[in-house]
Image (spheres, rainbow, N blue to C red):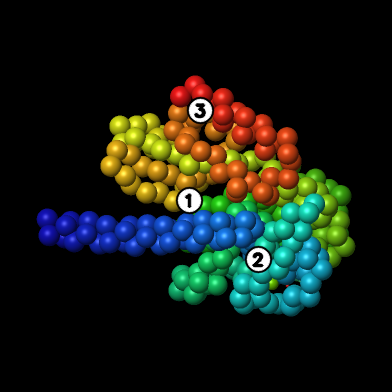
């Protein structure tokens, strides 16, 4: 009995700590976005995959890149412009298989800005075991409560044979950070993500609808939550194709946050859709 109670207490303490960490992170994310309106893209992945080389190529920069383990030891951020929209591109320390847990903990502070990102590019080296690299990276990130959307980027295309190139899943983007091959396609995928994937909204969910909301919660990313007398106000990002399912709770659409949505069509569509729904409420 006593052991059970101690176990549960310990578990609760742990969860509370995790949750407050998450909340702090989301707050940071929201504040930063409000302040600058600039989205962050993080380069994450296995060591030696070519993250720093890719940052250099994309941003015309000269960040230290080297053929050795852990060439990058801290996060470096540069401005990246795609079709007139500015992003912050963050380079991070690479992961390694079976990295001791205490080292992951040490990386955590370094990775804070990356964990907060709006989009992660998981970079892997196409010339070695890419599945292992992606798996290692995702495991490490998830152990740090990472939950941002991501694209998988397979690097070093320049040294892959034709048959090797056709082996990768269709949704992976093959590039060469050295020659620039595939970078145009990658940029297009990045802008498409920001253009069409999400809508930022403020929801109000009455306590009586909590259960229903919880069942749908996986389709959105909460950015902040505040508890009021009769329900919860939630600032969140919803996948566009799911916005409908939340319409009854939408109080407002944060158009101020859609400045990275470069397509005017989308912006007006989203807004007028919302107006129609508000009328229906
Ligand atoms: N052939 C080829 N080599 C590349 C490419 N991109 C990077 N490299 C090489 O791969 C090695 C590692 O590149 P980095 O950019 O330092 O790798 P990283 O992912 O930043 O590594 P860490 O900082 O240790 O995590 C360097 O020798 C690069 O020159 C590429 O597209 N093709
Ligand atoms: Mg590096």
- Tell me: 194 left or right of 146: right
Q: CA distance from mark 3 to mark 2?
A: 38 Å
Residue at 53% x, 67% y is: 112
Q: Earlier in the sequence, mark 3 or mark 1?
A: 1
Q: Earlier in the sequence, mark 3 or mark 2?
A: 2
Q: Earlier in the sequence, mark 1 or mark 2?
A: 2
Which residue matches tag 2?
90
- Asked whether residue 97 appears in the rendered view, the answer is no
Please tell me which residue lies in front, 194 or 43. Answer: 194
- Label 3's element? helix
Asked if the residue at label 3 sits under 8 Å from ligand 1, the reply is no
Residue 189 in the image, given as x and y percentages of width and height: 74, 47
Residue density around tag 2, few if under 14, some if 14–19, many if 20 or more, within 10 Å: many
Which residue matches tag 3?
278
Which is more foreground, mark 1 or mark 2?
1
- Tell me: 3 left or right of 16: left
Q: Quadrant of residue 52?
A: bottom right
From this view, report whether residue 252 is shown above or below residue 150. Answer: above
From this view, report whether residue 216 is shown above or below residue 44. Answer: above
Q: CA distance from mark 3 to mark 1?
A: 22 Å
Q: CA distance from mark 1 to mark 2?
A: 20 Å
Please tell me which residue lies in front, 272 or 98. Answer: 272
- Tell me: 255 left or right of 226: right
- Label 1's element? strand
CB of mark 3 within 8 Å of CB of mark 1? Answer: no
From this view, report whether residue 134 is shown above or below residue 270. Answer: below
Residue at 51% x, 38% y is: 252
Which is more foreground, mark 3 or mark 2?
3
The quarter in which the N terminus is drawn is: bottom left
């Amino acid at each position: 009995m006593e052991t059970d109670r101690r176990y549960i207490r310990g578990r609760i303490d742990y969860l509370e700590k995790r949750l407050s960490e998450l909340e702090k992170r989301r707050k940071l994310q929201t504040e930063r976005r409000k302040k600058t309106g600039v989205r962050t893209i993080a380069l994450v992945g296995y060591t030696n995959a070519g993250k720093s080389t890719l940052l250099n190529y994309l941003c015309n920069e000269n960040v230290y890149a080297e053929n050795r383990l852990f060439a990058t030891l801290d996060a470096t951020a540069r401005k990246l412009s795609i079709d007139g929209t500015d992003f912050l591109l963050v380079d991070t320390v690479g992961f390694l298989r079976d990295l001791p847990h205490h080292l992951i903990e040490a990386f955590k502070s370094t990775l804070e800005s990356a964990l907060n990102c709006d989009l992660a590019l998981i970079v892997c080296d196409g010339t070695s075991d890419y599945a292992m690299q992606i798996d290692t990276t995702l495991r490490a990130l998830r152990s740090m409560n990472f939950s941002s959307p991501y694209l998988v980027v397979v690097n070093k295309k320049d040294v892959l044979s034709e048959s090797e190139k056709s082996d990768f899943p269709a949704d992976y983007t093959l590039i060469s950070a050295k020659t620039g091959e595939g970078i145009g396609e990658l940029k297009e995928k990045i802008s498409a993500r920001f253009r069409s994937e999400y809508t930022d909204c403020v929801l109000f969910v009455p306590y009586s609808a909590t259960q229903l909301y919880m069942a749908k919660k996986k389709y959105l990313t909460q950015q902040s939550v505040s508890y009021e007398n009769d329900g919860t106000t939630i600032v969140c990002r919803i996948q566009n194709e799911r916005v409908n399912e939340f319409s009854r709770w939408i109080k407002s659409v944060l158009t101020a946050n859609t400045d990275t949505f470069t397509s005017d069509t989308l912006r007006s569509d989203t807004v007028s859709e919302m107006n129609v729904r508000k009328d229906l409420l």
